[in-house]
Image: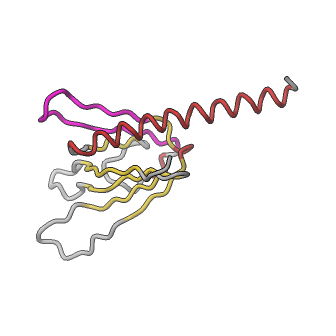
Amino acid sequence: MDDELSFIFDIPAVDPLGKLAVTGKFRALEEQVILHWKLKDRTFTQASNSMRTIEMTYDDIEEASVAAGWWWFSKKTLTVRIKDPRLVEEVPGVTMGKLELELPGNSVTPARKFVAMLDYRMSEAAMEKRQDRLKDLGI
């Protein structure tokens, strides 16, 4: 991959008052995936709301898929499952390592490219494991 692939996302609030709504940016680099996130800014809060960063490798991701309807008003989401849920446990709205990221319209294409790239990397890793096993068996 030559360029950085990135897109913005939202995670809707999980609490009734809407305090735990998340906004962020998902970046896919050459060797790692970086998830920048913060709680959405609220009008009348005085607490500092700093950006947090989670760095992962491609091996940490179990699967990813994009769901987007045909109509402009349909919800577009990227679902990412993380192998170790502890990596993303501090992010509100994440359950057992499953991130459901709502995408604005202009983030759907990069999200689909990320899913395709992840599938390619997963197949590459599986092929390397098979070759290592065959090499260990002397074939």
Q: Report the predominant secondary structure element of the magenta stretch.
A: strand
Q: In which image quadrant can residue 111 be found? A: top left
Q: Position of residue 40 (x, y in %)?
A: 22, 61
Q: Position of residue 24 (x, y in %)?
A: 30, 56
Question: Is 12 located above or below residue 77 in the figure?
Answer: below
Depth order, front residue of 65/5:
5
Please tell me which residue is depicted at 84% across the width and 31% down the height of the picture.
Answer: 136
Q: Position of residue 39 (x, y in %)?
A: 26, 61
Residue furthest to the top in view is: 139
Question: Is 125 located above or below residue 88 in the figure?
Answer: above
Residue furthest to the front in view is: 2
Please tell me which residue is depicted at 41% across the width and 41% down the height of the picture.
Answer: 114
Please tell me which residue is depicted at 49% across the width and 50% down the height of the picture.
Answer: 2
Q: Is residue 121 left or right of residue 38?
A: right
Q: Position of residue 51 (x, y in %)?
A: 34, 67
Q: Is residue 87 left or right of residue 41?
A: right
Q: In which image quadrant can residue 90 be found? A: bottom left
In the rendered structure, does residue 73 fall within the stretch colored magenta? yes
Q: What kind of colouring is applied to the model shown?
A: secondary structure
In the rendered structure, does residue 78 fall within the stretch colored magenta? yes
Q: In which image quadrant can residue 132 be found? A: top right
Question: Is 8 located above or below residue 120 in the figure?
Answer: below
Screen quadrant of the C terminus: top right
Q: Which residues are magenta?
A: 64-83
